Amino acid sequence: MVDTISIKGYKEEKIVTKFLENMDIITDEATYSTLNLLNDIFKKMGYKTIFDLETSTLTVVKNNKYYSVRVGLTGVNQEQAKAVEMGSHTLALLNRITKKVYDGFIYVDRGYFSDEAKEYAKNSERITLIDRKQLFQLMSKYYENVSMGDYYKSIEVLENCRRAECNGKMIYTLQVEKLNTIKVSDTYMHCLDCGMKFFNKDNYKIVSDN
Ligand SMILES: [Zn+2]
């Protein structure tokens, strides 16, 4: 009995460790370790999962509904920015290609989503988004060794939010509309708590307040 528990604990720790090791790089190993983590998390959430190692595809099933789990590797840790925001372009594409086979899809990104992408997902019953913060929230819920402190450590917070009433932390953010298309000019400071955005790090002009 004790053996079973310790083996399970060891296996779980390995799944999380592998994910964290590969979290901010773009490789096949990173895709695999992210899908492997999600496979484990969705099982814990009560889904039936189908993880095909050959094709690196993960399908999760609940109430007879089939969802394709897709992993975005935009991630963070670029030279100029610590966070990358995903636009709606990829979501629109995935919506089309998953429509015939799946009831919906879950798009998981190690970075973040643009307001436009979030809006796009909100207007579709087929799309669920999970960003870096939500991924850490899930991990800290289902794994004893992970806390939200690990999330904040993983993004190298640069400075406090400049908004007087907010105690949030700001990080550099980079917005991308298409996978592998990064325009460095789209960099801004972004508060993770209040969502305030400051374009041009030298100027801190307030451009959004939501
Ligand atoms: Zn703030």
Image (tube, rainbow, N blue to C red):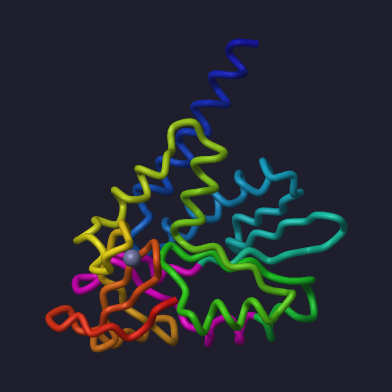
Picture quadrant where residue 63 is located: bottom right
Q: Position of residue 21 (x, y in %)?
A: 34, 48
At a point 65% along the width and 59% down the height, the residue shown is: 58
Picture quadrant where residue 181 is located: bottom left
Q: Is residue 117 above or below residue 112?
A: below
- Residue at the extreme left of the image, as rendered: 202
Is 42 placed left or right of 184 in the picture?
Answer: right
Q: Split into 4 quadrants, where in the image is the C terminus?
A: bottom left
At a point 42% along the width and 56% down the height, the residue shown is: 29
Q: Number of numbered discs present? A: 0
Whether residue 108 appears in magenta in the rendering, the answer is: no
Q: Position of residue 27 (x, y in %)?
A: 38, 63
Q: Position of residue 143 (x, y in %)?
A: 52, 35
At a point 24% along the width and 71% down the height, the residue shown is: 81
- Residue at the extreme front of the image, as rendered: 165
At a point 20% along the width and 80% down the height, the residue shown is: 204
Q: Position of residue 25 (x, y in %)?
A: 33, 61
Q: Nearer the viewer, residue 22 or 196?
A: 196
Magenta span covers which residues?
72-94
Whether residue 86 appears in magenta in the rendering, the answer is: yes
Q: Split into 4 quadrants, where in the image is the N terminus?
A: top right
Is 151 placed left or right of 185 in the picture?
Answer: right
Q: Is residue 18 above or below residue 7?
A: below
Is 95 placed left or right of 83 in the picture?
Answer: right
- Residue at the extreme top of the image, as rendered: 2
Image quadrant of ligand 1?
Answer: bottom left
